[in-house]
Image (cartoon, rainbow, N blue to C red):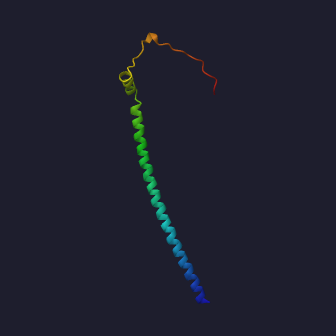
């Protein structure tokens, strides 16, 4: 009976060791994937910041005014010709 128990324990130990190797390998693969995704997230965050700066530059009032005057030949109207119209505010909450 002792020989049989030793064989059972040996098989259990072998299965446990193989399971440990498998779990460790999966952990390393997932960790590498996570590191890749974190670096990708950081790169996207930097690019988002650059795009926000670019948007702010492109939407600057001076730039829009310059484009309107030079490319579109727009001019500021005479203040006497400007008519302001007021409407009642709606009762939307």
Q: On the rendered image, what quadrant is the C terminus found in?
A: top right
Q: Is residue 4 above or below residue 20?
A: below
- Nearest the eye: 71 or 36: 71
Q: Is residue 91 left or right of residue 63?
A: right
Give the residue drawn at x 51%, y 70%: 22
Give the residue drawn at x 58%, y 17%: 87
Q: Is residue 15 above or below residue 68?
A: below
Can you tell which quarter of the image residue 57 is in? top left
* Total numbered circles: 0
Q: Is residue 67 left or right of residue 16?
A: left
Give the residue drawn at x 57%, y 82%: 9
Q: On the rendered image, what quadrant is the N terminus found in?
A: bottom right
- Nearest the eye: 54 or 9: 54
Instruction: Determine the residue located farthest toward the left in the rendered image.
Output: 70
Residue 42 image point, x, y percent: 43, 49
Residue 25 image point, x, y percent: 48, 67
Q: Is residue 9 above or below residue 85?
A: below
Give the residue drawn at x 39%, y 40%: 50
Residue 48 image point, x, y percent: 43, 42
Instruction: Determine the residue located farthest toward the front in the rendered image.
Output: 72
Can you tell which quarter of the image residue 55 is in? top left
Can you tell which quarter of the image residue 91 is in? top right
Q: Is residue 72 left or right of residue 5?
A: left
């Amino acid at each position: 009976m002792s020989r049989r128990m030793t064989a059972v324990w040996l098989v259990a130990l072998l299965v446990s060791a193989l399971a440990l190797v498998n779990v460790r390998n999966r952990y390393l693969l997932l960790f590498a994937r996570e590191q890749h995704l974190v670096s990708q997230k950081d790169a996207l965050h930097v690019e988002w910041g650059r795009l926000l700066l670019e948007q702010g530059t492109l939407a600057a009032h001076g730039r829009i005014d310059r484009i309107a005057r030079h490319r579109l030949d727009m001019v500021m109207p005479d203040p006497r010709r400007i008519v302001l119209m007021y409407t009642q505010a709606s009762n939307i909450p």
